[in-house]
Image: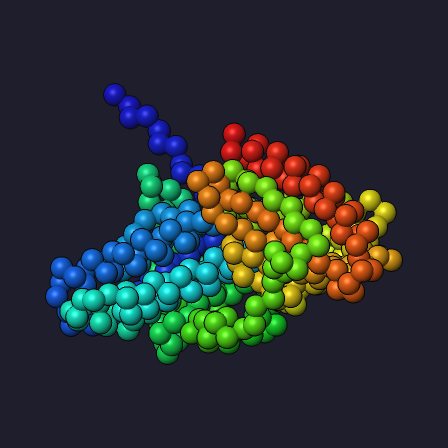
Amino acid sequence: MVAPARTAAATETGCLVIADISGYTGYVVGGPLEFTEEVVADVIDTIAGRLGQVLRVNKREGDAVFAYAAEGEADASLILDAVEECYFAFRSRLEGISHSTTCSCTACRKAAQLDLKFILHAGEWVRRGEELTGADVIVAHRLLKNGVGLSAYALVTEAFAAANGLDPELLGLEPHAERCDDVGEVRGFVSDLEERYRAERDRRRIEVGAEEAAFAVERVLPLPAAAAWELLTAPGKRLLWQVDDVEEAQAGGRRETGTASICVDGRTKIYEEILDWRPFEYFTESRTPEGRARFLLTTSLTPTSGGTTVVVRGRPVEGRAGRREARRLARRFRADYARLAELAGKGRE
């Protein structure tokens, strides 16, 4: 009897992300095992939950989380936002464990000594059941052992940068190279996440509050916050519900504070600049339609049982000059958000 021919597994391409806890061994060895493992499990849940907003979590690997996004599922800006937001949540969670607990055991007292590193790579893989395999999966895991010299960082490979059109120099990333015995030299770039965390913590917030808003429009989207964020901010997604064209000037290929855009809405050009960028929480932008009053807009996202509540609040920069524009903008955002809600609903079907 001739055995049936095996069908070759289909090759997939995309991005691979590993989040790995630094200081894990010393932490576990230095404290009561039952409590240290409980803390680590809690933190791993936080990491998986945050990355899972944007990426597909493939598996948990002890003190690490392995996730991926197939080509076209998430752009680089969204992935980098997810990585940094995950790190900020990780730090907040550990600080909360250390400061709010009444427990005096080593596991709780030393929780804040743990840290987190990320490997971001791009390439190919095949599936063996739920397992992702291939040379690029091996490369990503080999890079966990490296000479970066920081306890909190994101190591972005050249492959990831090239696949996603990033300019590491403009993004302020430091060049780095690793030589692995079985895969050769891998070149990449490093982002200091501790530095980013301090800068984010100290950066002044710019928000249009409810008390100063000239208008506010609210809508509940049946999506998680990260998915709603992508619809609200990614140029390709905005074309589906808000504007006819978007020309975005990104800093190194990433949307963040300072990114400027020119949008076309019918015959009107709209000049936009991001003033405050807090991924998955809110963003504030300056918006100036050609020949009209300049507005500040804050769009906030709040997770709810039904998905995500999105609220946009706006105020004119020049007082009374924008009252008529405020009424026009309110009408326009109500119409836009109705289309957005319809699009979000279709995405869930």
| Residue 125 in view of the camera | no
Residue drawn at x 41%, y 49% is: 52
Identify the coloring. rainbow
- Residue situated furthest bottom in the rendering: 149
The quadrant the N terminus occupies is: top left
Pinpoint residue 140: horizontal percent, then vertical percent: 39, 60
Can residue 287 be spotted in the picture?
Answer: yes
Compared to 6, does 151 lie above or below?
below
Vertical comparison of 163 with 345: above or below: below
Residue drawn at x 53%, y 45% as measured from the top left: 309
Residue 255 falls in which quadrant of the image? Answer: bottom right
Query: Is 185 left or right of 283, judged from the image as shown?
Result: left
Residue 158, horizontal then vertical, whole percent: 51, 65
Instruction: Choose between 286 and 34: the one closer to the eye.
Output: 286
| 270 to the left or right of 181 | right
In this view, the residue in front, 163 or 135, is: 163
Q: Residue at x 40, y 61 (%)?
A: 89
Residue 236 in the image: above or below residue 101: above
Say how many tags the image has.
Answer: 0
Answer with the quarter of the image where residue 107 lies.
bottom left
Q: Residue furthest front?
A: 211
Camera-side residue: 344 or 72? 344
Q: Position of residue 347 (x, y in %)?
A: 55, 35
> Who is closer to the viewer here, 337 or 321?
321
Residue 212 position within the rendered picture, expressed as x and y whole percent measured from the top left: 66, 60
Residue name at image x 31 percent, y 53 percent = 45
Q: Is residue 303 left or right of residue 214?
A: left
